[in-house]
Amino acid sequence: MLNILFWNLHGNSIEEVIAECLIENNISLAAFSEFRGIDFTKLEGLLFKQYHLVPSLREEPSQTQGVIHTRMFVKNNIEATAMQEQGRYSIFKIKTSIQQYILATIHLQDRINKTNTDRINTIKSIKSNIEKFENELECCNTIVIGDFNANPYDEELLSVHAFNAVLFKDLILANEYRTYEYLEYKHFYNPILDFISASNEMHGSFYHTGGSYTPIWHCIDQILLRKELVQYFEELKYIMKIGDTDLIKTKKPDGSISDHLPLLATIKEEVDSDE
């Protein structure tokens, strides 16, 4: 199993909580945003150096400009290489003992100070670079995970000019592309609706009561998959407790830990049939 974690850390120093989360959930790959409070060397030590921080391209002397919004932390038995960094997103080539993947980690512009147009413009860049690497690597085992700052039915997820995601598995299995204005746009699959429900308390990852029109719980931390991975997707959940630590306080995420709940996604790995 490939267990992938994404967590917007709200800038807090919570290395012990993160380490317990990674061990408890047997995490393979962990992506973090708003990680400025984290000492990754300390985190590596807490995990007995079984994980490491993937080197950033921006650490090269010729690429020191700009801010990185996501960082990747992986188990040592997984090969992860940063192929592209554009501030709001990073794209990695991932190799396990079984499969190769393209993984994009994102933290799109916030909902208060920016517009959906700002986010869609970033998404266009993400998609263009993903498609470039899919062609170069001849690999469509593509995953996008992160803080989208958009809900599943928002334009950023559904529009053909954005992620062009479908929310139902049978739709992408039947039609990998959507035709619009005589052009074909490749779908992503968003599995969120299969897993959120009041009955299992999977409400969302972010709680916000401001304004007169809001669902209170927002599913802004999400994962998208290409068709090739749809049948192997096993589970999606927002983690609400790590060990004895409750991540929810008074009905919303405990801000002293993070104002977001971590997202855990599980993909079953299988060898390609043509190998």
Image (spheres, rainbow, N blue to C red):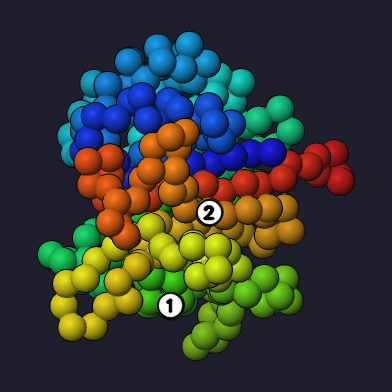
Considering the image in quadrants, where does the N terminus appear? top right
Residue found 61% across the figure and 59% down from its top: 226
Residue 22 place in picture, x, y as percent: 49, 30
Give left or right: position of 25 versus 109: right
Q: Nearer the viewer, residue 192 or 24?
A: 24
Considering the image in quadrants, where does the C terminus appear? top right
Disc 2 residue type? Lys
Residue found 45% across the figure and 58% down from its top: 222
- At mark 2, the secondary structure is strand
**Residue receiving disc 2:** 237
Residue found 54% across the figure and 80% down from its top: 183
Q: Nearer the viewer, residue 106 or 140?
A: 106
Q: Nearer the viewer, residue 250 or 194?
A: 250
Disc 1 residue type? Tyr
User: In the picture, residue 203 is in which quadrant?
Assistant: bottom left
Residue placed farthest to the bottom in the image? Answer: 181
Q: Residues within 10 Å of mark 1 (few under 14, many from 20)?
A: few
The reply to whether dot 1 and dot 2 touch (C-beta < 8 Å) is no
User: In the picture, residue 137 is in which quadrant?
Assistant: top right
164 over 6 or under it: above or below: below
On residue 229, the disc is none
**Residue receiving disc 1:** 153
- At mark 1, the secondary structure is loop
Give the label, 1 or 2, closer to the camera: 2
Residue found 24% across the figure and 59% down from its top: 109
Give left or right: position of 39 versus 71: left
Give left or right: position of 82 versus 207: right
16 over 245 or under it: above or below: above
Give the CA distance from mark 1 to mark 2.
Answer: 18 Å
Whether residue 90 can be seen here:
no
Residue 59 place in picture, x, y as percent: 28, 23
Q: Earlier in the sequence, mark 1 or mark 2?
A: 1
